[in-house]
Amino acid sequence: MSCAFCSPETTKGRIIIENTFAFAFPTIAPIVPGHVLISPKRHAIYYEDLTFEEKDAIEELRVQLKDALIKAFGAQGFNYAWNEEKIGGQSVPHFHLHILPRKEGDAGVYKYEPREFIYRTTPADERPNSSDDELRDIVSIIQKAL
């Protein structure tokens, strides 16, 4: 199997920082300047596939990069995201955390309304809220599945 993130040629000369289990590099198609990815060194597709050490290593790099992106790009806020499966937007089947440093005036979505962003066309302020009964039903359904 060929994996873009497992190939040293993909990230050659682009690694910003690394530790024993993870590394960070700028994406080739940034949404905003400073858009970086953090990935485990070991091939793993899903977050659940990561070891505790890999999760800790990714978090360690995220914290270090957050401070650096504030200094380097004047970030005033951040978007953190990962995608799973093609239907969820995952284009490289190797876990990677996106970090987008955000500031006033940059490109992209400012008002993040997940339901609108992901699949609904009706603005949030025009959709009815779920009733307490509906919300309790959802809680029950999910709890039964746990």
Image (cartoon, rainbow, N blue to C red):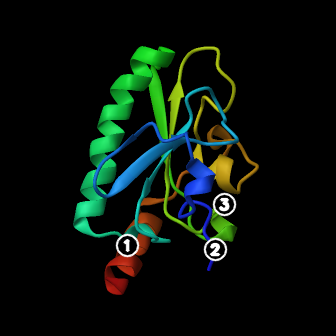
Residue indicated by mark 1: 48
From the viewer's perspective, is the residue at label 2 or at label 1 nearer?
2
| Earlier-in-chain disc, 3 versus 2 | 2
Whole-Å distance between the Cαs marked 2 and 1?
A: 21 Å
Going by the numbered disc 1, the residue's amino acid type is: Glu
Q: Quadrant of residue 47?
A: bottom left
Q: Secondary structure at mark 3?
A: loop
| Earlier-in-chain disc, 2 versus 1 | 2
Residue indicated by mark 3: 89
* Residue 17 located left or right of residue 14: left
| Number of residues whose C-alpha sits closer than 10 Å to that of mark 1, classed few (under 14), some (14–19) or many (20 or more) | few
* Residue 7 located left or right of residue 48: right
Q: Position of residue 86 (x, y in %)?
A: 68, 69
* Vertical comparison of 17 with 21: above or below: above
Q: Position of residue 125 (x, y in %)?
A: 63, 38
Residue indicated by mark 2: 2
**Frontmost residue, 42 versus 82:** 42
Q: Secondary structure at mark 2?
A: loop
- At 40% from the left edge and 15% from the top edge, which residue is drawn? 71
Dot 2 and dot 1 residues touching (CB under 8 Å): no
- At 67% from the left edge and 47% from the top edge, which residue is drawn? 117
From the viewer's perspective, is the residue at label 3 or at label 2 nearer?
2
